[in-house]
Image (cartoon, coloured by chain):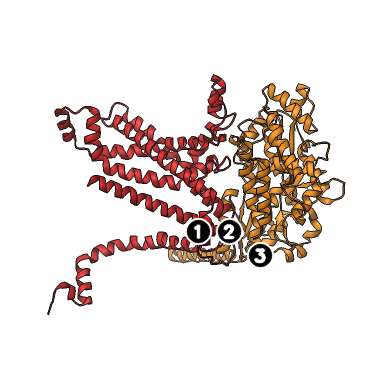
């Protein structure tokens, strides 16, 4: 008769598990409880709301099954918002990460004025998204904004009219403000990552005759790959969740030119009181964030293999 | 001896604590959420009113929390539904209707009877805060929309104030050629286009037609007459350079700045701005108000509405005290403070003989008093945004922005408004 661990009685196996991992489970427990209360429960509640026609005020929540999800598929504004999110994710990740990396590399050797530059680059992070939006809205503001005034002063036609009024440019104008805001964050993270780069490998590459670009591409970047992965995932998810800066600058306008899922969800849930539909939109946003993260991490893992 | 003093001291402290506790137990605490910020003297006015109310009713303590409109819109429903939110809320009338229909706002019918509100308030004023004839709140900001005119600038330049649409177009061409922005109008984020839609439409199809459309469902939003009226703004006035070319990039603050600095001689907006406008311009120029210019010789009307009102939460534990508080807010003493300090116009007769009011504000007050009391022959139109579903307002905001930049036709925009109008309540 077999007497291996697989055939031990359950109580014995639990006791053994407790002995080996009990302390670990105890340490995890508080975080797990917090996760259940503040993440899993609200998520489940949102999913339930997405199956109802609740308006946020009535006591009754009528269950309508997947009705909101069927409505989503036919919602032209959702697809337009998604398209804007994709543009935001691509440009809002690639540009600030590239610029952040460039700045980090320039300051890696701690040149004179390092602290000043680091503080300056990080400064926008201190003011936050909403204040950044207000600052840039004033820069772009028609007639009296900084850029239109510059256009008037130097007679530059392309600056005379507010970018926020142009449906073809408004999204990119807001995106520029967001890039200005986020460069500092990526810069600081990447600069910290650079502190862990093995200098001996770089010296070895130099001796082997590698030029600066080759050393960057073949020695530095591979060692930074984990940090780059993290900031890219953060930037992509940020691009899906973006709300504050658009809300403060354009509220999704003109027309719906800068509408993203975040602003559209807010309008539906809190302005038009379609909380059920808003919850369905937020489910889509959460699902897309999850898929994006998983896909990107899987691509990174394959690359490393 | 020392021990005796020690015990006497402890005894005295206990007596004070017990008395304070008993007093605190008797005192009712009313939590009030309002939107009265510092601008235009609103905060100081409400603080004065609260101080005098609490002096008169020492058993009631008012705890005031400033909650801006955006925040109210996002949190009012949850706060009222939770039962732990404010006892009294000062909120916009349009979103409050659905809160009332959901049972989150208390009906004021019994209190209206007890405090005689229906006799004291203008009927036209109470109409805005009624749902199916049932009173749900007391409006404070009775207001109308028109065009503010920088009279000083017109006189200095020897210009005539445009009274008709044709004169307006001519004026726009002339003033814009001289570097002015004729109308300080703005469309970012877009709610200001409620005015540039409502006023010309009223002037062309008439206040009676709009009344039928809004209250009796007679008529449509997408008729050729409506299209014509809207085109006077989005086609003809646009071509005549009446507004900044990048209208969708100008916000309301930017529009105010244009008017306050004399860069724009005309400013289409509502009487709620008078307090702030006078703060900014009283020393520099004189301002008047007029209705939107006449279109094809038809009658010009101001359009009126009720901006925000006081409501009582259905879940308050102190409805009696809350009603007492509301009643006090519209007492003669409080109304005098509202009018003089905050330039608010409550829908209630006001004795202004002893008041030192700016002529502009006095004009607005008199206009609403005459219209509200129904004693004169002055009739006002309706601020459409205060009477339509929220989706309709969203479409006005986004749709007219798209019309401005040529991505949507006026016909399509009005057809969308009609579609939303027909779908309301479904």
In the displayed structure image, the side of residue A235 where residue B194 appears, left or right: right
Judging from the image, what secondary structure is the residue with disc 3 in? helix
Judging from the image, what secondary structure is the residue with disc 2 in? helix
- Image-quadrant location for residue B262: top right
**Residue B279 % position (x, y):** 68, 35
In the displayed structure image, the side of residue B412 where residue B85 appears, left or right: left
- Image-quadrant location for residue B425: bottom right
Q: Is residue A266 above or below residue A195?
A: below
Looking at the rendered image, the disc whose residue lies closer to the viewer, 1 or 3, is: 1
Q: Chain of mark 3?
A: B
Q: Which chain is orange?
A: B
**Residue B294 % position (x, y):** 80, 36
The residue to which callout 1 is attached is: A69
Looking at the rendered image, the disc whose residue lies closer to the viewer, 2 or 1, is: 1
- In three-dimensional space, the C-alpha distance between marks 2 and 1, rounded to whole angstroms, equals 24 Å
Q: Residue at x 53, y 64 (%)?
A: A52
- Image-quadrant location for residue B113: bottom right
- Give the class, few, some or many, for how many residues have Cα within 10 Å of label 1's Cα (few <14, many ≥20): some
- Give the class, few, some or many, for how many residues have Cα within 10 Å of label 2's Cα (few <14, many ≥20): many
Q: Residue at x 77, y 56 (%)?
A: B216
The residue to which callout 3 is attached is: B319
| Residue B77: numbered disc | 2
Colour displayed for chain A in the image of the structure: red
Q: Is residue B111 above or below residue B374?
A: below
């Amino acid at each position: 008769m077999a007497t291996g661990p697989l055939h031990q009685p359950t109580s014995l196996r639990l006791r053994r598990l407790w002995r080996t991992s009990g302390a670990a489970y105890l340490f995890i427990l508080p975080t797990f409880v917090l996760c259940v209360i503040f993440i899993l429960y609200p998520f489940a509640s949102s999913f339930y709301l997405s199956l109802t026609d609740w308006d946020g005020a009535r006591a009754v929540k009528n269950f309508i099954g997947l009705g909101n999800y069927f409505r989503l598929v036919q919602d032209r504004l959702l697809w337009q918002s998604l398209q804007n999110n994709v543009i935001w994710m691509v440009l809002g990740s690639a540009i600030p990460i590239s610029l952040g990396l460039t700045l980090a590399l320039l300051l890696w050797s701690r040149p004179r004025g390092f602290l000043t530059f680091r503080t300056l680059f990080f400064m926008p992070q201190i003011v936050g998204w909403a204040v950044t939006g207000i600052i840039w809205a004033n820069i772009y503001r028609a007639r009296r904004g900084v850029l239109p005034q510059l256009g008037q002063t130097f007679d530059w036609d392309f600056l005379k009219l507010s970018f926020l009024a142009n449906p073809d440019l408004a999204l990119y104008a807001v995106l520029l403000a967001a890039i200005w805001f986020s460069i500092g964050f990526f810069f600081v993270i990447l600069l910290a990552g650079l502190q862990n780069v093995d200098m001996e490998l770089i010296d070895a590459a130099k001796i082997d005759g590698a030029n600066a670009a080759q050393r960057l591409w073949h020695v530095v970047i591979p060692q930074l790959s984990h940090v780059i992965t993290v900031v890219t995932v953060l930037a992509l998810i940020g691009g899906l969740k973006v709300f504050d800066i658009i809300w403060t600058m354009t509220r999704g306008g003109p027309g719906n030119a800068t509408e993203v899922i975040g602003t559209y969800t807010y309008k539906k849930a809190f302005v038009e009181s379609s909380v059920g539909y808003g919850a369905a939109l937020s489910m889509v946003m959460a699902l897309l964030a999850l898929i994006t993260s998983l896909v990107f991490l899987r691509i990174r893992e394959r690359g490393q293999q | 001896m020392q021990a005796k003093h020690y015990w006497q001291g402890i005894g005295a402290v206990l007596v004070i604590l017990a008395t304070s506790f008993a007093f605190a137990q008797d005192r009712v605490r009313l939590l009030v959420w309002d939107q009265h910020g510092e601008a235009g003297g609103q905060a100081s006015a409400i603080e004065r009113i609260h101080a005098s109310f609490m002096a008169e009713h020492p058993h009631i303590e008012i705890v005031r929390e400033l909650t801006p409109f955006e925040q109210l819109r996002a949190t009012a429903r949850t706060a009222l539904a939770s039962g732990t939110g404010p006892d009294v809320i000062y909120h916009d009338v349009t979103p409050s209707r659905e809160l009332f229909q959901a049972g989150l706002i208390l009906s004021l019918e019994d209190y209206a009877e007890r405090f005689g509100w229906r006799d004291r308030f203008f009927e036209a004023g109470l109409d805005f805060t009624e749902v199916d004839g049932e009173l749900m709140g007391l409006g404070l900001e009775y207001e109308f929309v028109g065009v503010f005119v920088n009279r000083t600038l017109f006189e200095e330049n020897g210009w005539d104030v445009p009274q008709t649409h044709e004169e307006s177009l001519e004026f726009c061409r002339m003033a814009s050629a001289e570097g002015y922005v004729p109308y300080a109008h703005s469309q970012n984020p877009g709610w200001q286009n409620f005015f540039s839609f409502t006023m010309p439409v009223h002037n062309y199809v008439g206040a009676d037609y709009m009344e039928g459309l809004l209250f009796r469902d007679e008529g449509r939003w997408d008729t050729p007459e409506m299209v014509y009226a809207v085109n006077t703004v989005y086609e003809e006035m646009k071509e005549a350079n009446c507004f900044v070319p990048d209208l969708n990039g100008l916000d309301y603050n930017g529009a105010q700045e244009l008017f306050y600095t004399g860069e724009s001689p005309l400013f289409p907006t509502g009487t709620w701005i008078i307090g702030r406008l006078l703060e900014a311009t009283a020393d520099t120029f004189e301002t008047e108000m007029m209705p939107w210019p006449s279109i094809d010789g038809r009658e010009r009307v101001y359009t009126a509405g009720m901006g925000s009102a006081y409501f009582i939460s259905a879940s308050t534990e102190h409805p009696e005290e809350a009603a007492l508080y509301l009643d006090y807010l519209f007492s003669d003493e409080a109304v005098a403070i509202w009018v003089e300090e905050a330039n608010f116009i409550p829908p209630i007769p006001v004795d202004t003989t002893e008041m030192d009011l700016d002529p502009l504000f006095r004009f607005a007050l008199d206009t609403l008093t005459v219209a509200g009391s129904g004693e004169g022959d002055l009739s006002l139109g309706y601020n459409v945004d205060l009477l339509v579903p929220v989706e309709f307002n969203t479409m006005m905001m986004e749709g007219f922005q798209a019309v401005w930049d040529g991505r949507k036709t006026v016909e399509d925009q009005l057809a969308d408004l009609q579609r939303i109008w027909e779908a309301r309540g479904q």
